[in-house]
């Protein structure tokens, strides 16, 4: 196939766009989209780009299948000696094994394929103490294996361990040839058929091995299996049948007779050594992967769009909750809600039984309580909105009840507001030419009552005008009203931004959607 530099550049750019995708929100379809992203990266990094850069590299045949299907026994028998630990029950730390001819070792000892795997050589110790940590790939060489083809024994695709299943899927994505092994008792199971359907979807070069078939039913089982393959559109897939033998009994610990695997070994050797067969094998799988991108990339782009829509819903819920509470606070101020309780009592007692400082203290405390109630009410609105939004699961619960830290932040903001209000009063007192000079604390207290008392403090404005005059009162009221608006917006915006920060930190943006489609378009143009 065409391996022009422009095609490789387009594939590399597409790979970077896929890697940039973020799918953190737990919405419907997200698990499947994450799996699609992981499979795309695995196929691009571990198979497609390396294959196109080095078309002369050996073919890689990955042997996959269910637990106890006989994969390792098959690999050992093809090689002619034990290279991969066999058995129905797998050690949980089992490392995949890649076997190749000694002349081909240099192709796999580096990071050309499966670059995220650490290479290790030699068999593990019998006590298992030297089992490598992390993601590792054990390399073995065997002169009995034909040049030009390598075998990779993958973990079970139906392993109880999620990590092993994901590892098996990733290794299969690196294959030129998919060798799917099943047994007479499990050939109709869902797991192997999922693998077969995936191979068909990617138009990969596929081989099936029906293993451990009892002699007395070998004809019947083979016909039934063939019928299932034909019905699934896989009738042309090469099929190899291995009868149940003493060597494969007892967990599959022995080597199969050479006659049992000779036909499969010959098929692999032909694919590796015949130029036309080799080109057809590698080209079909590579072209199949590229063709599959026409469907998989738009699906991934759609998942990105769904994530963005969910993030916008989360953001919209926060903004709507705090906007509604901002409007409610201003409505409460108009009706004089701040001048209630202790603040109202202080106002009625002022100036004879309550000092200006005490009145201002009570008004500031009531103003702070109103703001904190607004924050708590916004969070309650937010909890109710997020309760019906699956994406909210990525953010944790919204604050419940009286958030102590929020209360402290509101209190600090109100203290700053009070100090600025007092400075406004002091500035106006310095400007006045009246005698005697008005008391700045009294001016500040009356200004606060005028601005926050609503209809309940009608006389406050008149008293203020008597102290500093009508013009001074108008100036103070304008500045004071602007100051209150500023601090209401500041408090609610700070709390709103704190609720938005976890959403922003997820990094869900719409750009990757367009970038995925654009990268696919460039790739299709360069083919």
Image (cartoon, helix red, strand yellow):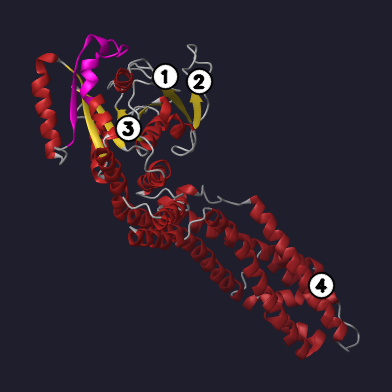
Q: Quadrant of residue 275?
A: top left
- Foreground disc of the pair 2, 1: 2
Reading the image, the residue beneath label 2 is 131
Left or right? Give the position of 359 relative to 519: right
Task: Looking at the image, tell me whether mark 2 or mark 3 is earlier in sequence order.
Answer: 3
CA gap, disc 2 and disc 3: 24 Å
Secondary-structure class at tag 3 = strand
Residue 388, position as x, y percentages in the image? 40, 53
Reading the image, the residue beneath label 4 is 352
State the mark number for residue 61.
3
- Foreground disc of the pair 1, 3: 3
The residue sitting at 89% across, 83% down in the picture is: 437
Label 2 with label 1: CB-CB less than 8 Å = yes
- Foreground disc of the pair 4, 1: 1
Label 4 with label 1: CB-CB less than 8 Å = no
Identify the magenta region: 237-264
Task: Looking at the image, tell me whether mark 1 or mark 3 is earlier in sequence order.
Answer: 3
Secondary-structure class at tag 1 = loop
């Amino acid at each position: 196939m065409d391996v022009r530099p422009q095609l490789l550049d387009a594939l590399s750019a597409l790979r970077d766009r896929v890697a940039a995708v973020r799918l953190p929100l737990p919405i419907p379809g997200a698990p499947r989209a994450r799996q699609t992203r992981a499979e795309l990266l695995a196929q691009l990094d571990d198979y497609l780009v390396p294959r196109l850069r080095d078309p002369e590299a050996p073919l890689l045949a990955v042997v996959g299948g269910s637990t106890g299907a006989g994969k390792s026994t098959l690999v050992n028998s093809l090689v002619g000696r034990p290279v991969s630990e066999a058995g129905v029950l797998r050690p949980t730390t089992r490392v995949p094994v890649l076997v190749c001819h000694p002349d081909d070792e240099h192709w796999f000892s580096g990071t050309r394929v499966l670059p995220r795997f650490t290479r290790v050589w030699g068999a593990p110790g019998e006590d298992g103490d030297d089992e490598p940590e992390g993601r590792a790939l054990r390399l073995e060489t065997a002169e009995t294996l034909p040049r030009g083809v390598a075998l990779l024994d993958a973990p079970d695709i139906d392993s109880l361990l999620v990590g092993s299943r994901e590892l098996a899927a990733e290794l299969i994505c690196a294959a030129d040839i998919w060798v799917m092994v099943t047994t007479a008792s499990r050939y109709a199971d869902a797991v192997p058929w999922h693998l077969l359907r995936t191979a068909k979807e990617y138009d990969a070069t596929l081989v099936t091995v029906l293993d451990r078939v009892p002699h007395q039913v070998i004809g019947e089982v083979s016909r039934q299996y063939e019928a299932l393959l034909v019905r699934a559109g896989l009738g042309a897939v090469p099929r190899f049948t291995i009868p149940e033998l003493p060597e494969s009994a007892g967990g599959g610990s022995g080597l199969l007779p050479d006659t049992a695997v000779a036909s499969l070994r010959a098929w692999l050797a032909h694919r590796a050594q015949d130029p036309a067969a080799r080109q057809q094998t590698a080209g079909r799988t590579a072209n199949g992967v590229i063709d599959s991108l026409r469907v998989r990339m738009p699906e991934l782009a759609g998942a990105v769009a769904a994530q963005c829509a969910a993030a916008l819903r989360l953001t919209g819920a926060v903004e709507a909750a705090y906007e509604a509470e901002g409007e409610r606070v201003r409505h409460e101020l108009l009706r004089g809600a701040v001048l209630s309780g202790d603040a109202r009592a202080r106002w009625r007692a002022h100036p004879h039984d309550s000092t200006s400082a005490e009145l201002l203290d009570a008004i500031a405390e009531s103003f702070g309580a109103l703001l904190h109630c607004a924050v708590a009410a916004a969070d309650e609105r937010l909890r109710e909105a997020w309760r019906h939004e699956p994406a909210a699961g990525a953010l944790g619960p919204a604050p419940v009840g009286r958030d102590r830290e929020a209360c402290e932040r509101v209190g600090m903001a109100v203290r700053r507001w009070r100090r600025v209000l007092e400075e406004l009063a002091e500035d106006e007192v310095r400007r006045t030419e009246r005698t005697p000079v008005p008391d700045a604390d009294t001016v500040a207290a009356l200004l606060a009552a005028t601005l926050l008392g609503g209809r309940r403090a009608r006389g406050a404005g008149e008293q203020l005008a008597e102290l500093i005059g009508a013009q001074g009162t108008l100036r103070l009221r304008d500045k004071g009203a602007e100051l209150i608006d500023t601090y209401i917006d500041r408090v609610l915006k700070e709390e709103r931004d704190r609720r938005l920060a976890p959403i922003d930190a997820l990094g869900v943006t719409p750009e990757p959607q367009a970038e995925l489609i654009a990268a696919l378009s460039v790739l299709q143009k360069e083919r």
